[in-house]
Image (cartoon, rainbow, N blue to C red):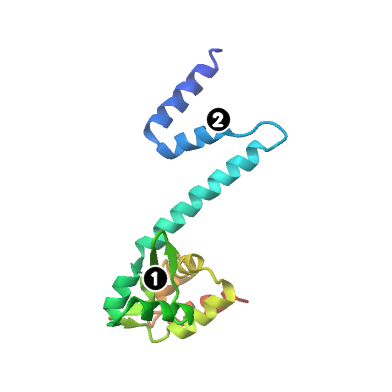
Amino acid sequence: MTAALTPLVRDIEARARRDARFMRVLDALRDAPTGPEGSLERSAAHLLNEQRRAVLITDFTDGALTTAQVQAQLGYATPQAVHRLRTRKRLIGAPVGNTTWFPAWQFDGGRLRVELPSILEELARFTGDAVAADRVMRLQRDDLGGSSIAEALRDPATERAAWRALTALGA
């Protein structure tokens, strides 16, 4: 090994010891096809996409309620009643593993938000994916003073700007 590569190898080795995600990238690079059956760029892009999706899913579930929690909050007798709301597009949720998660911003004081039907209608013009819709609603925005659309809709001072931002999504 040349003297120029030695510091690089030491740096890579040190980072791999302290960063499990970096180690997974190195493993993927090691195992990536180098022949005509695949490309390194495609393998790296696939791995990066998987990592980004995992972060989005974790963020989604961290800000969401399970079916059982929604059932208890709304006072429904069965979990099927909660799932009927989802199939009728009156509530958004997504299965992750064996649990269906419902973004918490859809609720207010133990009930569905009064303006939820209008919010969901606007979101449906933009996406049918619950994870993407949740991200749109919870992403902090400069045009809303650092608030998310979900937060800004609750504040009379920013409510109109939040509705403009929400309606602009499907435009």
Residue positioned 42% across, 61% down in the render: 96
Residue furthest top as drawn: 2
As drawn, 36 above or below 89: above
Identify the residue position indicated by label 2 in the image.
30
What type is the residue that disc 1 sits on? Phe
Q: Nearer the viewer, residue 12 or 158?
A: 12
Q: Residues within 10 Å of mark 2 (few under 14, many from 20)?
A: few
Task: From the top left corner, tell me how far across and down residue 21 is, in percent.
Answer: 44, 40
Identify the residue position indicated by label 1 in the image.
102
- Kindly state the secondary structure of the residue where label 1 is placed: strand
Task: From the top left corner, tell me how far across and down residue 98 is, in percent.
Answer: 39, 61
Q: Is residue 55 something one can see in this rendering?
A: yes
Q: Is residue 158 something one can see in this rendering?
A: no
What type is the residue that disc 2 sits on? Arg
Residue positioned 46% across, 52% down in the render: 54
Residue furthest bottom as drawn: 114
Place residue 86 in its image quadrant: bottom left
Residue positioned 42% across, 85% down in the render: 115
Q: Residues within 10 Å of mark 1 (few under 14, many from 20)?
A: many
Residue furthest right as drawn: 36
